Image (spheres, rainbow, N blue to C red):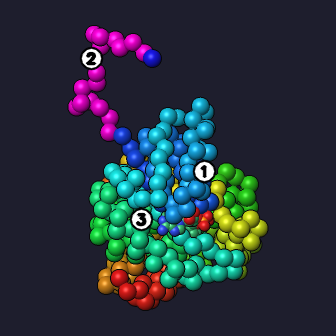
Amino acid sequence: FFRPVADVPGTPTSQRRRLTKVSVIGAGNVGMAIAQTILTRDMADEIALVDALPDKLRGEMLDLQHAAAFLPRVRLVSDTDMAVTRGSDLAIVTAGARQIPGETRLNLLQRNVALFRKIVPPLAEHSPEALLLIVSNPVDVLTYVAWKLSGFPASRVIGSGTNLDSSRFRFLLAEHLQVNAQDVQAYMVGEHGDSSVAIWSSMSVAGMPLLKSLRESHQSFDEEALEGIRRAVVGCAYEVISLKGYTSWAIGYSVASLAASLLRDQHRIQPVSILASGFHGIPDDHQVFLSLPARLGRAGVLGVAEMELTEEEVRRLRRSAKTLWENCQLLDL
Ligand code: 6V0
């Protein structure tokens, strides 16, 4: 098709850029929202999709491939065999039984642990240097399961955790204050879901401590109002699930933003599920994964921000850690 140009040397091997490969395990609503966001943000040279349902998987791959004329050039591959993930830089696991309306995330646990036994060991074998990013629920316990089953160092096993909860938190505060959510600094930490902890003491807007300003301007931000907002953040997921059956877009953007921080070595601080033993009085021998603001880069978790928490926040965080650790201990790993 093209005539070769004889006197132009090819790129020397030493100058060739290493291609970036991302695998998404589970091509359901969440997996596909993540894949398409990563695709449109031009973060990967190759995306591998894996699912247990071959027809659905091929359909999803073709549907994305047909958008090639409008997107960055990305090689899209798919297979039910985990070998297609070989050489991944980042492997994102979303495969799992979906949360049924009203079902707590912890109820999903046993079903998903059995699934992880089939997925994580081959994934680790095919990509021994990869970063693992776990999204399937209950995400904190399953991140612990993935850590155990992969044999990877904890710095390379990360759960999407409360990155999404924090985005919902910032959205609700931003709506209340009529500002842009990107100008609201606010974290939810601990367990993703029901026992997540809102860190009221560190909330700020444009660098101004929010709680102090609200109290000084006599706005009704008492303990009850604050707990109401926290409950609204937790309730968000249940509301979306009861309305449309699942959540997908927000988790898609949330995980794509984590993927960018990791693959592009951005050193951003985002609340994700990490091995939290020893932080905020969580006992060293409780190998529990829960969300704390972590500095993320190409090597995975580079550090954890030592936030100053109130006594009440620490108490809630430890309670979250205790529940999660009790769940982890029920598992035979
Ligand atoms: P879904 O649409 O049912 O997709 C799950 C996919 O996994 C399906 O396509 C299955 O075929 C596939 N699957 C099942 N077994 C295997 C296997 N052995 N190998 C490969 N693929 C397999 O569910 P949805 O996409 O809505 O949710 C996926 C998971 O994400 C669930 O556990 C959710 O609870 C969880 N979420 C986590 C969030 C978070 O913030 N961490 C947010 C939203 C959903």
Is 223 in front, or is 84? 84
Tell me where residue 236 appears, x and y as whole percent: 69, 69
Q: CA distance from mark 2 to mark 1?
A: 40 Å
Mark 3: which secondary structure? strand
Q: CA distance from mark 1 to mark 3?
A: 29 Å
Residue 73: in magenta span:
no
- Looking at marks 2 and 3 on the same chain, the residue that comes earlier in the sequence is marked by 2
Mark 1: which secondary structure? helix
Q: CA distance from mark 2 to mark 3?
A: 42 Å
Q: Which three-letter amino acid code belongs to the residue tagged 1?
A: Gly
Which quadrant holds the N terminus? top left
Residue positioned 73% across, 58% down in the render: 175
Mark 2: which secondary structure? loop
- Any atom of ligand 1 within 8 Å of the CB at mark 3? no
The disc at residue 158 is 3
Q: Which three-letter amino acid code belongs to the residue tagged 2?
A: Pro
- Looking at marks 2 and 1 on the same chain, the residue that comes earlier in the sequence is marked by 2
- Up the image or down, 143 lies above or below 261; here it is below
Residue positioned 61% across, 38% down in the render: 67
Residue linked to disc 1: 59
Residue 6: in magenta span:
yes
Is 209 in front, or is 40? 40
Q: Which three-letter amino acid code belongs to the residue tagged 3?
A: Ile
Residue linked to disc 2: 9
Tell me where residue 299 appears, x and y as whole percent: 32, 55
Horizontal side, residue 287 vs residue 191: left or right: left
Residue 154 figure quarter? bottom left
Which quadrant holds the C terminus? bottom left
The disc at residue 81 is none
Q: What span is colored magenta in the figure?
A: 2-18
